[in-house]
Image (tube, rainbow, N blue to C red):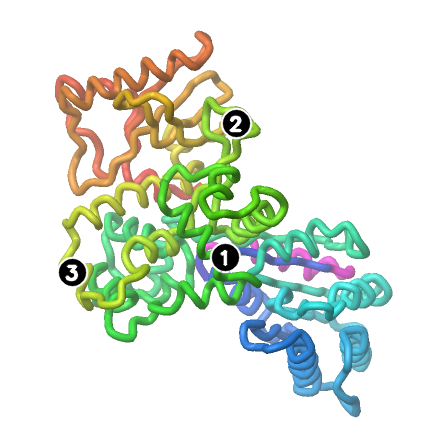
Amino acid sequence: MIGRENERQTLERLYERQKAEFIAIYGRRRVGKTFLVDETFGDRITFRHAGLSPAEWRSKEEALSAQLSHFYQSLKLQGLQSAVCPTDWLEAFYLLETLLLSMPKSDRQVVFLDELPWMDTENSHFITALEGFWNTWGCHRKNLMLIVCGSANSWMLDCLINNHGGLYGRLTHSIRLAPFTLRESEQFLQAKGVKLSRYDIVQAYMAVGGIPYYLDAFEEGLSLAQNLDRMFFADHAQFEDEYDRLFSSIFTDPERMKTIIAFLYSRNAGYTRKQIGEKLGMSSGGTLTNFLTTLVGSDFVTRYYPYGLSKREVYYKLTDPFCLFYLHFLSGSERRDHHFWLNNQNTPSVVSWRGFAFENVCFRHIDQIKQALGVSGVRSDHSAWSIREDDLEGAQIDLLIKRDDHVLNACEIKFIGDEFTVDQGYYRKLLRRQELLLETISPKWSVHQTLITTYGLRYNEYSGIFSRVIVMNDLFREL
């Protein structure tokens, strides 16, 4: 298993503690939560169950009945004797207690409940029953290890991890499973026998992010272009319906969520809540706030404060690579070139996508960038920066790293197939940008012009404008 050693060690340590454990694992859908539990515990799992997707049920009564029936079937398959199907979750968890009591007390009992948010259908009182199961019985069983997973991050955070009711403080541990880094993605592809250059691995990451499920679709013996065409553009492509399935499986109002995501896609820097509400005709109050919180919690959107603006002016930016790729190349296209990537690698559409997608990759690898700068131990904040009311060219910085050692790294991000060259016009643009930035900061701060690019900087009379250069290989560093 690639890239999950810390998480595995944590789970093994909790397993060996021989005390009641209640562990929540959360993360973006397809990130590998179930795989982590399976690979760590294997046949040591005493009881396992996965909730049913809520997308197909016509009523809340039908949804509850289906979830309970499915849970009952899991109980019977895994050893429950002489019982009838429960009519509510209190009965269902009582049957789980009965099953566990019938097993040897000396054995560690690992109970794995996957896709937990799906089990909490409307008016099912699922959380109340889970509270009763754990607070009355489970927390007193020193041999019990309850592991729960879910892709609806907002539900996992609100109902479990930050619960203020009967489950407040009851979790013994939580694990947020992050997407792979570039290095881990490279290791994953190499383990599959997929041979791609780092230049192409970065582009693969731009398209699908560090999501193991998507990376697993890359086939050995094919180029990046052939793989992307097969996965997205061919007739009956593997992921042609993935965008709709993804939203339907996570959100109760997927169409509204897709509307917000599509609007955020229209500007790389993102929008404030007020701007989103005005454009989409939605109140910027509680409902929109809840939608945005859910999208942030589900790892589709990043919430940040642009440098130089009030801390009350929060921006929401679409950062999920898969969504960005889909909306740029596939959304609304009824007829597709089945060899689109092979035929369009140097077109303006692909080149522009590479530009903003590489910025997103850099934002996701801030720790690697700081390590390359030699400032891993220095606390910092990072964001984009621009002077929106100023029409002067150069009043925008792709990435600004504000460090506690009074240095601002003003990062220019360029994804090209060769060394980057600074000409006279670009040199003047960078000087003007630096002047505008210096006007906004205290004299005790210094600005370091920093280039983040693929193959480095071609030196000439203007290249000295950059005091530091970060290359593509730096983003593959192991932390």
Q: Nearer the viewer, residue 413 or 60?
A: 60
For label 1, the residue is: 256
Give the side of residue 414 with respect to residue 69, left or right. left
Q: Secondary structure at mark 2?
A: loop
Q: Are circles 1 and 2 on residues that touch, CB within 8 Å?
A: no
Which mark is drawn over residue 379?
A: 2
Q: Magenta span: helix, strand or loop, mainly?
A: helix
Location of residue 375 in the rendering, given as x and y in whole percent from the top left corner: 44, 27
Can residue 220 be seen at all in this image of the molecule? no
Residue picked out by circle 3: 342
Quarter-wise, where is residue 422 in the image? Answer: top left
The magenta stretch is 3-21
Residue ranking furthest to the front: 281
| Residue 452 part of the magenta segment | no
| Viewer-nearest of discs 2 and 3 | 3
Give the residue displayed 29% in from the left and 75% down from the top: 236
- What amino acid type is highlighted by mark number 2? Arg
